[in-house]
Image (tube, grey):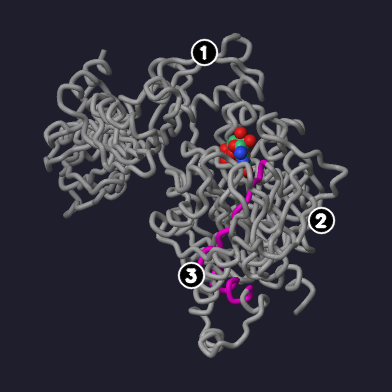
Amino acid sequence: MSRFTEQLAKTRNMGICAHVDAGKTTTTERFLYHTRSHGKHKIGDVDEGNTTTDFMVQEKERGITIQSACVDLTYRDHRINLIDTPGHIDFGIEVERSMRVLDGIVLVLCAKGGVQPQTRTVWRQANRYRVPRIIFVNKMDATGADFYRVVGQIEGELKAKPAVIELPIGNEREFRGVIDLLANKALIWDASDETGETFEVEEIPAELAEKAAAYRKTLVELVAEGDDALLERYLNDEEITAAELKAALRQATVQMRLVPVLCGSAFKNKAVQPLLDAVVDYLPSPLDVDAVRGTTPDGTATERRTSDEEPLCALAFKVANDPDHGNTVLTFVRVYSGVLKAGSHVYNSSKDGKERVSRLLKLQGASREEVDELRAGDIGACVGLKNTTTGDTLADEEKPILLEGITTTEPVISQAVEPKKRDDADKLANALAKLSLEDPSFRFGTDAESGQLIISGQGELHLEIKVDILKRTYGVEVSTGMPQVSYRETVRGKAPGVGKFVRQTGGHGMYGHAEIELEPLPKGTGFEFVDAITGGVIPREFIPSVEKGIREALQQGVLAGFPVVDVRATLVFGSYHDVDSSDQAFKVAGSMAFKDAFLKAQPVLLEPVMEVVVEVPEKFMGEVIGDISSRRGKVVSTDIENGTATVTAHVPLSALFGYATVLRGKTQGQGVPNIQFSHYEPVPRELSEEIISKARR
Ligand code: GDP
């Protein structure tokens, strides 16, 4: 093994995911504590709002993690790059972009709450990106903690094969430590030591010996199943060492056959070190993962292995402003292959341009260390990139590769904003530009008619948080208008349309004539233009003008000024005039033909429908469902377990304003909704007429 391969084998790029409040921040904080020189780092507590990963003020106050901060840790001679993934569903894109660059995940579950809606979302995403995981059942000290119930849910609800490698010793207030099933030992923490640094290794308590033996037997069988040699020895009653089991369990975890399950209490600082051990022992190194796939500029599929010797290939997965350092733009990258050097020029294959990397940084929450290079498998931040945005590939210009970009969803809600102080207009525009660079799911622009500044994003909370950032980070206070739903327009039928634009005024005339067929396309297809002109009835050079005219009309909408989606326009006929025809005239003709066809093709207004997941004590279920129905919502599923009801519903966004507050009121503060965009659906007729007449006014 070369020195670099050896280093890579000792690298873990991992993230911690959890449902809000399961203890992700606290666990991260404990990781920092146990992996650093203890003198430098004061142990932080979320409740006191001084943790390292949640370094943004908004996050401290809201107790949720908005930014994926990247932290670099050292443990047992291993480098752990910890990507802090967000815990709130409104920031789905943040989760997705971290998934892209992670090799493994620690999923934190609450020992009381178990598998929760956000856990299921994260699980699905991790499946999609094939990210191996281990599970930490946290809050074993809390009232109502039940490790075995949670293990049942992992199997039943997440459909995973849990490899239980620890059992709790004591429960709730009596929780003292864990049984390490591989080593067959008990690890006991001293209750009086709040740092959790020291623990005793003891014999398994007699009252748990039988249970531990049974669980160990199951574990050995599970692990051996995937390894023929081990299985044979197991069946022959031969001794299998802990080290052999560990190696086989590592294989099974990396291949996503098994999910190691551990438990502890991050808050009480008990059993955190064994979790760090598990990260090192079971989560993959960059060498364990498949080669990253992409395409060359001519579209040929290609790939890069994790190696310093391969040409450079890196993915920019986040662009962030660093308000504490003069608003420097930080571009977070994962290097898949090759070496990225400070002071070098790199090729951005997504933008087809060269960029200079002036400096490279490794980050530990709010503090940073400058480095000369980032190697294959590394994660860090670049300073100096000007045109690189989230999802871009950086590569070697001689051997370019383009990775698949990070998908962003179109905004579903918008809101007018205006600076409270007139003088702040420029400052606001600058701040908005930075915010949208950081978060491609957040946009801004000027309304052509009213001249108002409009911000748009993924939900009410998403916009609220941006407004908050404007105030705190950029010192710009804004007043906001009512949030507006981003409707869309489309057609349900097929219809022809004629556009004839003829002006014979004085000298130079105008002549353009286009005829189209308009028809609906499947959801999410967008727009398609087909040129079916034969016999040169419209000269070649004017056809792009017709298309341009149609595209502009699409943007402006026909019914109520909302963008038109999912239609195909086929240009079938037209005519021209030798002297009077021009690009301009054909553009207008295209737009006229489109509007004509659109109104005849059963036009409809579409509205964004959100998936709402609410978890409440069972007694509130009836009321929650009643309220959802009164909001034009449809319940998709309900589930009751241990007195907790989970209601999943589809509800139009326009009926959801202020929902979080109402729900809290109806459930004595116990209901928190998870809301994310699901799909577009036609607006009921009466409502649609109302929206259209309002828009026309
Ligand atoms: P996050 O939203 O997943 O980041 O969760 P936090 O780390 O912010 O924790 C949410 C709340 O649970 C805070 O009040 C923590 O103090 C508390 N908490 C976290 N871990 C534990 C634990 O192990 N035991 C108990 N009893 N509370 C915990």
Residue extending farthest to the top is 421
Give the residue type at disc 2. Answer: Asp
Which of 146 and 255 lies nearest the eye of the viewer?
146
Asked whether the beta carbons under mark 3 and mark 2 sit within 8 Å of each other, the answer is no
Name the quadrant containing residue 583.
top left
Disc on the earlier residue, 1 or 3: 3
| Residue depicted at 62% across the width and 27% down the height | 58
Q: Which residue is mark 3?
A: 257
Q: Residue furthest right?
A: 39
Residue drawn at the location 71% of the way across and 65% of the way down: 203
Q: Which mark is residue 479?
A: 1
Q: CA distance from mark 1 to mark 3?
A: 52 Å
Count every numbered label the image shows and give the total.
3
Q: Residues within 10 Å of mark 2 (few under 14, many from 20)?
A: few
- Asked whether 677 falls inside the magenta stretch, the response is no
Distance between mark 2 and mark 1 Cα atoms: 45 Å
Give left or right: position of 414 versus 291: left
- Residue shown at 79% from the left, 50% from the top: 197
Q: Amino acid at mark 1?
A: Ser
Q: Is residue 225 above or below residue 322?
A: below
Left or right: where 508 falls relative to 536: right
Q: Which mark is residue 372?
A: 2
Q: Which residues are magenta?
A: 246-267
Q: Secondary structure under badge 1? A: strand
Q: Is residue 488 above or below residue 198?
A: above
Chain-order first, disc 3 or disc 2: 3
Element type at mark 3:
loop
The numbered disc on residue 329 is: none
Q: Residues within 10 Å of mark 3 (few under 14, many from 20)?
A: some
Residue 199 in the image, given as x and y percentages of width and height: 77, 55
Image quadrant where one finds the C terminus: top left
Label located before the other in sequence (2 or 1): 2
